[in-house]
Amino acid sequence: MKKHILLLMALMFSFGAFAQSEYGPSTGQQNHNLFSGTGTNAGFGIKGGVNFATLRGSDKDVLGNFSGLTTFHAGVYTQFSLGNTFSIQPEALYSRKGIERNDSTFRFDYLEVPVLAVFNITETVSVHFGPQVGILMSAKEDDTEVNIEPLNTFAYGIAAGAEARLSIFRLGARYNLGLEDLRKENNQGQKINQDIKHGVFQVYLGLGF
């Protein structure tokens, strides 16, 4: 597990270092506006917010009646300019997902690394799109630890959203479409092919520097 975490962190920072050396600061990279802006298109910061998590897929009915779970995410990001209107934004986030079912709360905690393409459509508004990968850190039913061996511990998917900036503040919304099945084995350790995946809508507030 520690090796997976270090690999994700190394991926984020090595990608950022490559972008910085390859495209390095220039006059155009300080322009955050598609038309005439004066903001910044590079930097780093912290962010956090609310997760509205649920499960999706053709086999989700096997779980019976369940409802989504309102949880949280938090982490850091860095942004590297590729020109007047484009930039790349890697992030490292701790993100909790889950559901409520049969008076129990099921929680899945992930370390996630999105790598997003950012397109600035105005001086203060941008849209984001890109892949993300993650590692399942732990799973709990209420306060009881759940064995994660039957679960897919490597997560991957697509993230897309929009963000507005005001001074150093960033307010955004994003949807994370999980593409890996939640479970890879049943409780007897037998391989299964069960179409149940995460889906998370996020609202966040960030500070950029």
Image: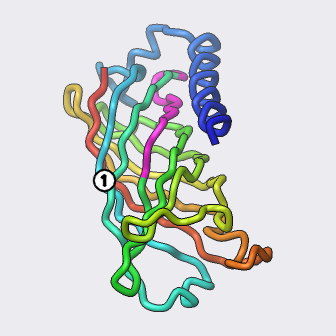
User: Is 92 a magenta residue?
Assistant: yes
Residue in the image at 57% along x and 23% along y: 13
Quadrant including the C terminus: top left
Q: Position of residue 107 (x, y in %)?
A: 43, 64
Residue at disc 1, secondary structure: strand
Q: How is the image coloured?
A: rainbow
Tell me the amino acid under the disc marked 1: Val
Q: Position of residue 15 (x, y in %)?
A: 62, 25
Residue closer to the observer: 25 or 51: 51
Q: Which residue is rendered at x = 49% and y = 8% of the image?
A: 26
| Residue, far front | 144
- Left or right for 115, reference 41: right
Residue at mark 1:
203
Q: Identify whether 128 is placed above or below 66.
A: above
Magenta segment's dominant SS is strand
Which residue is drawn at the image coordinates 49% and 22% (left, top)? 81
Q: Does the stretch in magenta take in 65?
A: no
Determine whether, in the image, residue 149 is placed left or right of residue 162.
right
Q: Is residue 104 above or below residue 164?
A: below
Label 1 crowd (10 A; few <14 / some 14-19 / many >=20): some
When the figure is inspected, residue 62 is found, relative to residue 135, above or below; the finding is below
Image coordinates for residue 1, horizontal then vertical, percent: 64, 43
Q: Quadrant of residue 188?
A: bottom right
Q: Which residues are magenta?
A: 82-95
Above or below 124: residue 99? below
